Amino acid sequence: MNRPAPRIDLFDVRPEDERAFAFARDLRVIEALLFTSSGPVEARALKPHLSKEADLGALMEALTADYARRGVNVMKAAGGWMLGTAPDLARVVAGPLPEARKLSRAAIEVLAIVAYHQPVTRAEIEEIRGVSTSKGTLDVLLETGWVRLRGRRKAPGRPVTYGTTPAFLVQFGLDAVQDLPGIDEMKGAGLIDGRLAAGFAMPLPSDDPSLREDEEALEPEALDFALSPPPDEDDSDTPDEA
């Protein structure tokens, strides 16, 4: 197997053959960790298993280049790395899968708002959408694992705040939520009309897990608030739900 030559650190006084051996071993360690992981592996999980002088950037660059020619590629996702089927072979390996639950238009809109505006409350989602949003829509997104309860807003009623999860990033092939398309990209793809209202802007998304100044931690029983309302509860958004 031809692997890229190791990057030499001028301050590393070990013999060149020893450095090459360590580089090759570290590559194998990373390869094994990625292969046995069910999700993205972050740098902090890799480093304890590598040699003291390991250059993780060089190692991942070498491993990514090596796997680029294979049916399985090294991919960045959710702030880490994972092995995934090469995009051009996705249809080859896709077997008969159970029909996935299709999200309603309302759920897709809410998911987009959560992704770009997080942390965001249900009332804030409704204000942005311009229509009432049922708890059922949020329940569907919580069940997918793409949206989570973050905390509570320090405001009257202490409403729950929502944010995206690492599973959301993996599902949509994103390394970070900041990789979501901006206005120019959406215009180029024809998703947004070029004639936007004056002053229209999109927020720079951030999924920083730490609570904001206007948020406080959830108490354990807060999970009960994610349950759907009784079937007879009136909700103007219900017809659009998944």
Image (cartoon, rainbow, N blue to C red):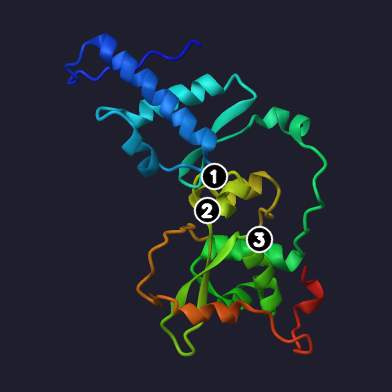
For badge 1, the amino acid type reads Gly
> In this rendering, would 202 be left or right of 100?
left
The CA distance from mark 3 to mark 2 is 12 Å
Residue at point 66%, 53% (across, down) = 194
5 in relation to 86, above or below = above
Q: Quadrant location of the C terminus?
A: bottom right
> In this rendering, would 169 be left or right of 135?
left
Residue on which disc 2 sits: 166
The CA distance from mark 1 to mark 3 is 16 Å
Quarter-of-image position of residue 235: bottom right
Could you tell me residue 109's position as x and y percent? 68, 65
Could you tell me residue 128's position as x and y percent? 61, 73
The CA distance from mark 2 to mark 1 is 9 Å
Earlier-in-chain disc, 2 versus 1: 1
Q: Residues within 10 Å of mark 1 (few under 14, many from 20)?
A: some
Earlier-in-chain disc, 1 versus 3: 1
Contact between marks 2 and 1 (CB within 8 A): the answer is: yes
43 in relation to 67, above or below = below
Earlier-in-chain disc, 3 versus 2: 3
For badge 3, the amino acid type reads Thr
Tag of residue 39: 1
Under circle 1, the secondary element is loop
Residue on which disc 3 sits: 144
Residue at point 67%, 78% (across, down) = 135
Under circle 3, the secondary element is helix
54 in relation to 202, above or below = above
Nearer to us of marks 2 and 1 is 1
